[in-house]
Amino acid sequence: MLINKHNIKLHMLIIPFICCLLSINLKAADQTLIKNPDGSSVLTKSDGTEIVTNPNGSSVETDPDGTKIIKNADGSSVTDKKDGTQIVINPDGSSQETDPDGTKIVKNADGSSVVTKKDGTEIVNNPDGSSVQTNPDGTKIVKNPPK
């Protein structure tokens, strides 16, 4: 092959393009995507994360640390963490978190929340910043909203 200024220019264009393609292929090799005939798919990432997506848009993600995230088609989700914490998020944005020690935190769509501790203490936080804490013995602590 004769080398002339036209061949050199062509090589200068082709070589970066080939390098770009190799880079894309290497990145694609870091994960595996299987598409099933029913419309579902399984994506396995290089870190071991697996995401199964169903035809209706729902999915289940399992992380290497054992965390499992279930996303429903309606926008709700359930996350189960390795430490035993469970977080449920509803389509309206409200949620409930249950910790391994038994503490429950309920956050409502209106901005209020209720924390229930394993000893039975309940703390109701209102959107205006006021709160009421009810202790296991029945005593209450009321905090007025900030001025």
Image (cartoon, grey):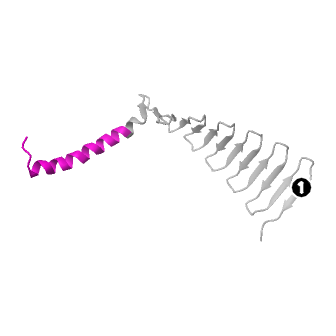
* Residue 98 on image: x %, y %: 72, 41
Residue 3 appears left or right of 41: left
Label 1 crowd (10 A; few <14 / some 14-19 / many >=20): some
Report the residue at 57% width, 42% height from top. 74
Residue on which disc 1 sits: 140
Figure quadrant of the N terminus: top left
Task: Indicate whether 57 appears above or below 8.
Answer: above
Quadrant in which residue 126 is drawn: bottom right
Q: Which residue sits furthest bottom?
A: 147
Circle 1 SS class: strand
Query: Is residue 4 part of the magenta span, yes or no?
Result: yes
The residue range painted magenta reads: 1-26
Query: Is residue 16 part of the magenta span, yes or no?
Result: yes
Residue type, numbered disc 1:
Lys
Quadrant in which residue 80 is drawn: top right
Q: Which residue sits furthest top?
A: 37
Quadrant in which residue 110 is drawn: bottom right
* Residue 68 on image: x %, y %: 60, 36
Q: Which residue sits furthest front?
A: 3
Report the residue at 56% width, 34% height from top. 64
Of residues 57 and 44, which is closer to you in this image? 44
Report the residue at 46% width, 36% height from top. 46
Main secondary structure found in the magenta portion = helix
Of residues 75 and 51, which is closer to you in this image? 51
